[in-house]
Amino acid sequence: MIAKAAAGFRLIPSSEVRVSESEDTRERSHPIVPKLSSAALRDVRKSTARHDRVERWNLPYEPRSITHEQSVAEIRAIYERLDSAEQKCIEADSDQVKELDKPLLPGQRRLEDKQYRSSITLHQTLLEEHYEFLLVSHRPSSNAALNRLITEYQMKSRMWRFGIHSFLELLRHRLPESKDHMFTFLKMAYSMIMSLLERIKTFEITWIEYLGDLAHYYVAIKDDTRDRQIWIIMANDWYTKATDRSPLTGRLYHHCAILAKPDIQVQLFYYLKSLVVADSFELTHESILVFLNPILEKDHIKLQTLESDHLFVRFHARIFLRMDLNRASLNADGFLDGLTDSIGNAGADWKKTGAFQAASNVASLLKYGAKDLQPAEIAFFQHCCRMTYLSLGICLDLADNYLQRFPTASQLSQNDIPWNLIANMLNSLLRLDHSEERISSITKGFPRTEDPPRPLTEDFLLRGWIYAEDYFPPDWFTKTLADDDDARTLELDSMEKDRLTRIL
């Protein structure tokens, strides 16, 4: 029935709608739809009339009864306007890119205020058409064929690239001249995506990621340090929400890594996590070089004067880049020698620091996301084992699970695992708070101390990693995230008992 209802309806072949590096390669044609009577067409034009001055997403949404024939005609009318506006934006942005490298005379501006306002209006027009297209194709009365148009013709990525991102990049390169105009456009785009987040839940993760990107752009136009920090926190919150909903997507952790600056240990963790999750983000290989190279360039600094976090990151940098095992070993020794003092100085903050360090160490056991371990890399892997199993942290109770799945790794690392220390630690924990009784009461399955379950703060760091894919029950995070997006950072005193039970 759906096929019959959509018969004769198509916009353009999906193979022709691609968001490529060269916009000129995209072929265009108009949608083919059933013919309507003149009266019906007048009704459609009236219903899709433009609202001047006020953005459409700031107007009340008034759902109305409409036939499939009217929906098809409305989609066609919107797409014709959208297609025209998109082409104008592409051409305008392309012309302005050519002007970026031209030298300016003293006091000369790239564009006058009137030209900036004209460019904003042009891109606003495109965004409004995209907004209407998204709403109409997802009306309750729309059938599956109309619903699929957004994905089939890459409407979300086209809206972002041609309607928002390309123009924001132009404005960013013209700072500080374009500051006020960039703020105006950002405010408009942010408002639109927020409205989409409320009205079209189907693409919730996409809208959340876009909001994170827009919040990150706000940082570029804020002069006050406090304002910049506020927007960094907001961007990170959006990206964190996205990772909670799509924990296997490496690109999202790459965003978090960029925002974690200047905390180099947290940056390292997120870059590595973006490589070892199921849907790894290959561009991280380029970004992590930009991150690591400046750290390695400070080789003239004596090891004794380096902070613990720099020694830790330097070790992983040398292993990741497969360079200078001797120096990597010196970095590891320096880090391990000072680890006891570092834990004491950090106090309660060590719960967070240690979790990030342990997770990064385990990423090294996973070869930083590489598929195979080459014979020439065995020495590097052995250094990773030594670093991991001599470090104190959360990875101690994860290592055995990993080794069972990878026998070769087990053979290489057996001598490095401090079995006696692990046994002593477990026996000490067992004597605390009558834990033995609680452990014996757990007959099978994942230990649950509450129902619905309450994840530990470090559970959110582990979520999405390859070695933890079968670790948590399916419903482990559902209730907490539904109630409170900030629950991941809430550390309660009672969690210590849960943590002890989990380890044992």
Image: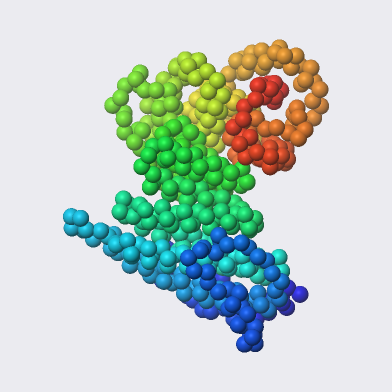
The one of 105 and 154 positioned closer to us in this rendering: 105
The one of 493 and 11 positioned closer to us in this rendering: 493
Q: Quadrant of residue 429?
A: top right
Residue 244 vertical position relative to residue 201 in the rendered view, above or below: above
Considering the image in quadrants, where does the C terminus appear? top right
Q: Is residue 414 left or right of residue 186?
A: right
- Tell me which residue sits at (51%, 79%) in the image: 29
Q: Quadrant of residue 461?
A: top right
Considering the image in quadrants, where does the N terminus appear? bottom right
Residue 122 vertical position relative to residue 279 in the rendered view, above or below: below
Residue 284 vertical position relative to residue 406 in the rendered view, above or below: below
Rendering coords of residue 360 (x, y %): 52, 32
The one of 103 and 218 positioned closer to us in this rendering: 218
Rendering coords of residue 413 (x, y %): 56, 26
The residue most toward the bottom is 38
The residue most toward the left is 106
- Tell me which residue sits at (74%, 31%) in the image: 446
Q: Is residue 501 visible?
A: yes
Total numbered circles: 0
Rendering coords of residue 318 (x, y %): 40, 33
Q: Is residue 179 left or right of residue 493?
A: left
Residue 214 vertical position relative to residue 262 in the rendered view, above or below: below
Rendering coords of residue 449 (x, y %): 75, 27
- Tell me which residue sits at (70%, 13%) in the image: 432
Q: Is residue 299 left or right of residue 62?
A: left
Colour approach in the figure: rainbow
- Tell me which residue sits at (69%, 22%) in the image: 494
Q: Is residue 10 visible?
A: no
